Amino acid sequence: MYIKTSKWSWLAVTPMMIFLLGIFVWPVFSFLMLSFGDSLSAPSFVHYQKIITTPIYRQIIFNTFNIALLVTIFSVIFSYPIVYLLANVSKRMRKFLFILVLLPFWTSALVRTTAWIVILQRKGILNEMLLFTGIFNEPISFIYNFSGVLIGMTHVLMPFVIFPLYAAYKNIDYSLIEAAESLGSKSYQTVKRLIIPLTMPGVIAGSIIVFMSAIGYYITPALMGGPKQTMIAMLIENNINRTLNWELAAALSSVLLFSTLILFIIFQKYFGFDNLLSSNSQKGSSQFYKRKEKFSPSKITMYFLGGLVCVFLIAPIVIVFPMSLSASPFLEFPPQEYSLRWYESFFSDNRWLRGLWNSLIAAAVTIAISLPIGTLAAVGVNEMKRKTRLWLETLFILPMVIPVIIFAISLFYFIAPLRLNNSAVTLGIAHSVLAMPFVFLTVSASLKNFNKNLELAAYSLGASWKTMFWRIMLPSITPGIIAGAIFAFIQSFDDVILALFLTNIKSRTLPRIMFEGVAHEIDPTIVAISGLLITLTVLLFAINALFASERENDPNI
Amino acid sequence: MTQTFKNTLTIKNLEKSFNDVMALNDISLEVQEGEFCSLLGASGSGKTTLLRVIAGFESPDKGSLEINGRNLNSLPIANRNIGMVFQNYALFPHMSVRENVAFGLEMQKLKKIDINTRVNEALKLVDLRNEATRFPNQLSGGQQQRVALARAIVIKPSLLLMDEPLGALDKNLRKEMQAQIKELHKNINATIIYVTHDQEEAMYLSDRIVLLDQGKIIQSGTCKELYSSPKNRMVANFLGECNFIKLEDGRNITIRPESFAVLDRKTSENGIEVTIKDLVFLGSYTKLIGSYNQQEITATFRSSDLNPNIRKLDKVHLIFNKECLINL
Ligand SMILES: Nc1ncnc2c1ncn2[C@@H]1O[C@H](COP(=O)(O)OP(=O)(O)O)[C@@H](O)[C@H]1O
Ligand SMILES: [Mg+2]
């Protein structure tokens, strides 16, 4: 019996292993090898030397780490008030706030960037408001500079700190705080001596992820920063598309990848990646006795700050809707006149519709590939011993970690000679690499919740493994599979970077066309599309929540 | 004499409700300086709530709290100088034993030297000097318990509150810790309010027991008072076992199992004839379970006092002294 399932489990993980090794690991490896020159027997390090000796490259690497560090620090500072808010509000409100926190993360980079530009540009909403209040009499440049990059990146990366920090905060046994108070501790002392040290592990876990993701960022700094905020990923892209220096691009990619992997290994060693997506926390043991606190000045301040952070997170997403309904060809707020003309312009323009069609093809291919393969892998890994499992899990989530730009260029390098690029189907296959880890993680999470005794009960009633899987296991992991499908769809539908390298004017996707638009001048049609995309995201979220809540009511858990 | 009464905790007409549940219902209580007072009661009877109101973690709906005649109601927790030992110990996991114990003194902004001296004293008192640099997760349950104790007493609280502090320990360790707490109480002469649902523990430790039920004080007094003159059946049952017997002549009597003597024939008016249903040998004493007019009777005897020839289903006479009856 046992031997049989273990054979099954290897069979189940094989497709994902082959897929990732063939389409992800091998292309990336081949591309990176370029950095050592033509002959592998006599590797040359000239390109690495060039990186070290050229001041502009050193500057860009320093910039990258500097931006990543600041983004991390801001993410941590802003996370505390919102976590405090999350921990203290009612259950309903908390659910709402969680969605608020996650929305920017699941909104396409282009939609977010578009919205920020609308808000922050010199004639943007924020400047108009500031001028109106009379505090300033000249518009401030928030964007196309350092602050633009910081705002854009902190906005999207904050959830990575918020979730582990919230889990750590909720895990603090409330009686510890009471103990401190009874020993004479004032609230600021309790924060300093208890809350901060006890939440440190969560903060560090989140910080590593933020920093790791930030150093590979491409879209946000490219669209919201200025020339001085060039980051490594942009330099790599520049070397491929402008200077055509593939070897140097490969060397830069190696540097970026190496830094990313080091951080990833540290994180895996101490925290474990699979815990990150789930915000589940055990409750502190004396939750029952948590008293209702009276409103104190410090509490009101924290609530206020938490509210501000919420506004920061949600404002760009909300603002898109009224803007998209403006009749004016210029982006103005509040709109003088409302109309649906920009939505009409989207649906009547062949260029946009073709983009939409290509995006849908790519997304369909992505789901078709990543869903069965990812699900199967999760089921297989679930049966394995801890150690094997850890290795496989690490391989399977690698695509989430490695900067997309490196993968995009590698794949381009790999398949361009075969003339396989420039097709939405190919793009979908590439997107499957990005989407599969999400499917794997969501299904794994629901498998962890699956009551092992149900499986044993099925066997004891004479079911074979196959019958058990179809009749018992699959129905109970369906919510995880649905969540995986949604994540896979979003991964594909929001991607710009792969599309930039793997599509041409005929096969380009919606986000790619938007990117080209945003990089020049924002056409209000883009804002309308952003509105549509946000609506779509919210809808998918709602579907997911629906299935998740059904699961919560399941007595088997 | 008047000096002693200065440090009295006075609770008057305290009330506290949670939603519909009346957790504390008109509680009035006085605890003298140096007294060891136990709150005894079934689970859900409001013991923890009373302790938490005294500590300031909950504010009462009604009533007042005073120490030394000083009203506590509006005093912040941090200024009450009340030591608390939590049921789950609530040790700070990221601080060593020494840091845990020093915490309260640091809050008082004492000098480093003074803190050190007092921490050492406290650790010596609970016999943990060798574990000072360890962290809570490196300690056994009993040791953690002692750290919690040291941390609470080091601030020289005017009142020490303990909420089922031994609840998580196994039986042997519990006995040992009870002895240590009793010793400690003598040494530091602290005023202690101690919550437990274990009547033996309460009797062993306390000068006075306050019996709670559904948020009300049912009876309060020394162990002896509560045992020999319980106010009602519930009290009688809660502290030790008790027989409630309806005699043939219609009288109702209440009697403790150990108040019987056993004879094989009737010698006085005050006796009942029972059929032995079971004899349970429990070491130094033996428990006799018998039936009398379809009522179950429990009696205990020193094993050595019992006639070795009596058997199950024998009929015996249980004789009692009128003075031993409990008046309800
Ligand atoms: N924070 C609270 N919220 C709601 N009900 C509570 C709370 N604390 C206590 N109670 C209720 O008050 C009653 C007394 O509880 P408690 O003081 O914990 O009893 P004990 O410690 O004697 O077991 C119980 O019915 C309990 O359910
Ligand atoms: Mg209790």
Image (spheres, rainbow, N blue to C red):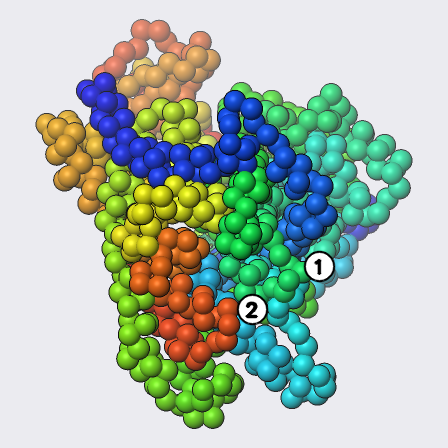
- Residue in the picture at 31% in, 37% down: A19
- Give the left or right position of residue A529, taking residue B128 as reference: left
Which residue, given by chain and number where applicable, does mark 1 sit on?
B76
A416 or B276, nearer to the observer? A416
Judging by the rendered image, the residue that carries numbered circle 2 is: A312
Q: Is residue A56 above or below residue B94?
A: below
- Mark 1 or 2, closer to the camera: 2
Q: Residue A324 lies in what quarter of the image?
A: bottom left
Q: Chain of mark 1?
A: B
Judged from this view, the residue extending furthest toward the left is A462
- Quadrant containing the C terminus of chain A is top left
Q: Position of residue B44 (x, y in %)?
A: 45, 48
Q: Is residue A512 left or right of residue B104?
A: left
- Which element carries disc 2, helix, strand or loop? helix
Label 2 CA crowd tier, 10 Å (few <14, some 14–19, many 20+) = some
Quadrant occupied by the N terminus of chain A: top left
